[in-house]
Image (cartoon, grey):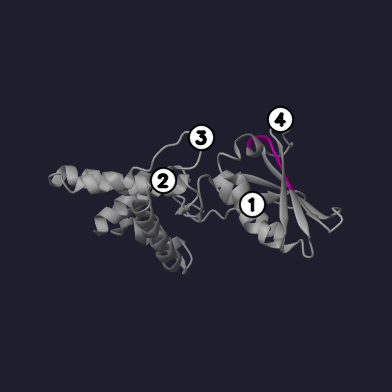
Amino acid sequence: EIYLIGKGPSSSHTIGPRKASLKFLAASGGAASFRVTLYGSLAATGKGHLTDVAIRDVLEPKGHVEFVWRPSEVLPFHPNAMRFEALDSAGATICEQVIYSTGGGSIVTEGEAPDQSEDIYEISNMTDLMNWCNTTGKTYWEYAAEHEQSDLWTYLSIVWKVMKQSIANGLANEGVLPGPLNLRRKAASYYIRSHDYKDVLRTRGQIFAYALAVSEENASGGTIVTAPTCGSCGVVPSVLYHLQK
């Protein structure tokens, strides 16, 4: 739940809608086209957050996608709401679902019970966890290993590969980020400049460049790992990558 792999720049506005699109597509066989109505926050800031791009990437290979934007209309359950409609060749609705993007990439379908997260960790604050480590002689990762499922390390190895790839992509890509501000990517130039610094400043410059590389990938709709959100996705990979190197 903390380390989700998905497209930036927003857990709520891109990862959630993409997941919702995949769910609706699986239930809408035979559609000639689609109509997607975005409500509330998704409609108000969706274009800036590439919500339409995330949805179109999933649905458009199966048919044309029409978007309806209703920023002033908020559905009762949650402000991030989407109505998916599958249309036949005459434009008649053959299937529809209302799906909410409730934060962190999670979705809830109207009429279905929301998924409940399993509370697997007994300790809920760092002080108690440190005391546990001091008492048992074990470390943080051993506490996680005792409570998580056996596929923990397999999943984290995938997460780590995606994190490193997002750094590599961010350092390789230049140009202007999407959106009306015309912000230029800077990670590559900061990284190159860091090689001229002495040791301490070089370390700081490279850590900053790694973090910025991931953030710029996120801002451009690239694949990143939430840690725990899209907005903070650059910090963990930059520190871990620096430590590895």
Image quadrant of residue 48?
A: top right
Measure the C-alpha gap from mark 1 to mark 3: 21 Å
For the residue carrying disc 2, how many other residues have a C-alpha within 10 Å: few (<14), some (14-19), or many (20+)? many
Measure the C-alpha gap from mark 2 to mark 1: 21 Å
Residue depth check, mark 4 versus mark 3: number of the one nearer the observer: 3
The picture places residue 231, in percent across and down from the top left corner, at 45, 42
Residue identified by numbered label 3: 180
Residue 72: which disc?
4
- Residue 223 seen in render: yes
Measure the C-alpha gap from mark 2 to mark 4: 30 Å
Q: Tell me the amino acid under the disc marked 4.
A: Ser
Measure the C-alpha gap from mark 4 to mark 3: 22 Å
Residue 55: which disc?
1
The picture places residue 77, in percent across and down from the top left corner, at 71, 39
Whichever of callouts 1 and 4 sits on the residue coming sooner in the sequence is 1
Q: Tell me the amino acid under the disc marked 3.
A: Pro
Residue 153: which disc?
none
Residue depth check, mark 1 versus mark 4: number of the one nearer the observer: 1
Q: Secondary structure at mark 1?
A: helix
Q: In the image, what residue occupies the spot 22% across and 43% down?
A: 204
Q: Secondary structure at mark 2?
A: helix
Measure the C-alpha gap from mark 2 to mark 3: 15 Å
Residue 216: which disc?
2
On the picture, is 80 further left or further right than 232?
A: right
On the picture, is 217 further left or further right than 27?
A: left
For the residue carrying disc 4, how many other residues have a C-alpha within 10 Å: few (<14), some (14-19), or many (20+)? few
- Residue 131 seen in render: no
Q: Tell me the amino acid under the disc marked 1.
A: Ile
Measure the C-alpha gap from mark 1 to mark 4: 21 Å
